[in-house]
Image (cartoon, helix red, strand yellow):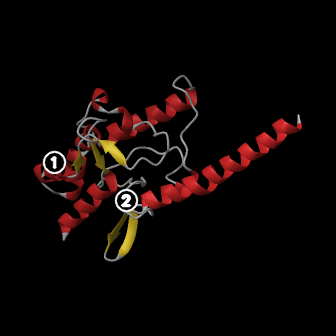
């Protein structure tokens, strides 16, 4: 039995060094080559950090594009999804309320036109992107509140749409913070 305990302790020590020291150093080194040098892609305006490209923010004013709902109130310190299933009555009421709000502020759209990402939270609760369709259904509202031509707002959406990863994986998406900052730039 002593032989197995010593082997277990050795394996534990090797795994601790590998997983608690070597692996984190490799990840930190690789992160140094990313856009934000491992600290996230900061978005700045006038020398001030206004957000991060990979963390969603709450936009509720009608003159802005709205992002995906968050299960954690956009609190990056507590990233999490909801554990409510599709048959949970509280969850269904929450989704129904989100649909009603979208229809209230976007009367030109139909219930069937609302993409799922506009009324359901992501797994992290911090998704910064919405689907291209999620942005398109909001163009008319944003243009009306800002008193801007719809065509100009639509062009801005197209300009800020990112295609699928490597042209293959996932749908086209729009980073809501970057799109809203681009909208604010139109005023200037």
Q: Position of residue 87 (x, y in %)?
A: 54, 22
Determine which residue is flagged by label 2: 34
Q: Is residue 24 left or right of residue 114?
A: right
Note whether 136 is above or below 17 in the view shown. above
Q: Position of residue 172 (x, y in %)?
A: 26, 40
Few, some or many residues within 10 Å of mark 2 (<14, 14–19, 20+): few
Outermost residue to the top: 87
C-alpha distance separating marks 2 and 1:
30 Å
Give 60 or 73, whichever is nearer the viewer: 73
Q: Is residue 10 left or right of residue 81?
A: right
> Which numbered disc, 2 or 1, marks the residue that appears first in the sequence?
2
Numbered disc total: 2
- Residue sitting at 25 percent across and 37 percent down? 133
Note whether 29 is above or below 74 in the view shown. below
Which image quarter holds the C terminus?
A: bottom left
- Residue sitting at 24 percent across and 55 percent down? 145
Few, some or many residues within 10 Å of mark 1 (<14, 14–19, 20+): some
Give residue 187's quadrant in the image: bottom left
Give 86 or 42, whichever is nearer the viewer: 42
């Amino acid at each position: 039995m002593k032989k197995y305990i010593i082997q277990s302790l050795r394996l534990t020590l090797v795994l601790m060094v590998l997983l608690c020291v070597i692996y984190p150093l490799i990840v930190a080194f690789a992160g140094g080559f990313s856009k934000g040098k491992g600290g996230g892609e900061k978005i700045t305006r006038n020398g001030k950090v206004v957000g991060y490209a990979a963390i969603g923010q709450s936009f509720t004013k009608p003159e802005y594009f709205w992002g995906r709902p968050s299960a954690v109130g956009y609190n990056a310190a507590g990233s999490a999804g909801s554990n409510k299933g599709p048959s949970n009555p509280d969850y269904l009421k929450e989704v129904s309320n989100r649909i009603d709000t979208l229809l209230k502020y976007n009367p030109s759209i139909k219930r069937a036109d609302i993409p799922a990402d506009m009324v359901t939270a992501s797994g992290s609760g911090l998704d910064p992107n919405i689907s291209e369709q999620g942005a398109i259904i909001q163009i008319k509202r944003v243009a009306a509140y800002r008193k801007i031509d719809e065509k100009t707002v639509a062009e801005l959406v197209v300009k800020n749409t990112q295609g699928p990863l490597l042209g293959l994986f996932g749908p086209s998406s729009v980073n809501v913070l970057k799109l809203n900052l681009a909208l604010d730039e139109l005023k200037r």
